[in-house]
Amino acid sequence: SQQGEEDPQALSIQEGENATMNCSYKTSINNLQWYRQNSGRGLVHLILIRSNEREKHSGRLRVTLDTSKKSSSLLITASRAADTASYFCATRNSGGSNYKLTFGKGTLLTVNP
Amino acid sequence: NAGVTQTPKFQVLKTGQSMTLQCAQDMNHNSMYWYRQDPGMGLRLIYYSASEGTTDKGEVPNGYNVSRLNKREFSLRLESAAPSQTSVYFCASREQNTGELFFGEGSRLTVL
């Protein structure tokens, strides 16, 4: 069964606004990753946050992790039309195989020009 | 570098036919994966190969077989295709140090 669940399922905003997507998971993790998928394309890695980290930044991306609540959020600041894509969280569970990465169902972000 | 290359990009099969999806990576990664993506279901792991010579079942392995031919190549075979296997299939390889997955562009399979 899938570990991560993104919320909301779909988000529509105007260019320049910030977009926040959330991911909840069920079991303890070693790390959590966020990926982006443009329509009809493969997934592209955005950022990884380890279980002992609380916040991480990469350009316009900010990821937070709250292990007590088993949740993570991805914030995209000053969004652009080119940010329109699906965003997925993926977790590597502690105690499980080091090689298995489990994905959520994704959030579809639409940024309107 | 090409990264992860999947073939074919599109395929239509009739129920009961067999086919093999090919995947190759040129990043010298040890681990490789096959996922399927269905609307509303996200990505589900079919099989993975932690290293050359090993393969393991993922979340939805039934109806599939895999072969890790060498370090570069990891193929997925459907022996007797069923309509429930209509999906988009993604191959990925894993960078050892960061754990980041690199994905191919996908293979869109329709089983009639």
Image (spheres, coloured by chain):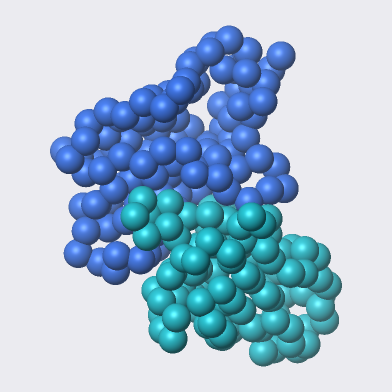
Chain colours: A blue, B cyan
Comparing A105 with A50, the one in front is A50
Relative side of A26 to A100, left or right: left
Q: Position of residue B39 (x, y in %)?
A: 63, 53
Q: Nearer the viewer, residue A36 or A69?
A: A36
Locate residue A103, reporting x and y percent: 44, 53
Estimate the x, y position of residue B89 in percent, counting from the top left. 64, 65
- Height in image: A71 above or below A97? above
Q: Quadrant of residue A3?
A: bottom left
- Residue at x 74%, y 87% (from the top left corner): B18
B89 shown above or below A21: below
Residue at horizontal 47 percent and vertical 65 percent from the top = B29
Can you see residue B60? no
Residue visible at 62% across and 70% down in the picture: B24
Image-based side of B45 in relation to A80, left or right: left
Which residue is at a point 22% across and 58% down the rendered structure image? A94
Looking at the rendered structure, the number of numbered marks drawn on it comes to 0
If the image is split into quadrants, where does the C terminus of chain B sit?
bottom right
Left or right: residue A65 versus residue A19 is left
Q: Is residue A28 visible?
A: yes
Looking at the picture, does residue A105 appear above or below residue B8? above
Pick the front one: A95 or B54 = B54
Image quarter of residue A112 = top right
Where residue A58 appears, as percent x and y from the top left, is 41, 27
Vertical arrangement, residue B85 with respect to residue A74, above or below:
below
Quarter of the image with the N terminus of chain B in it: bottom right
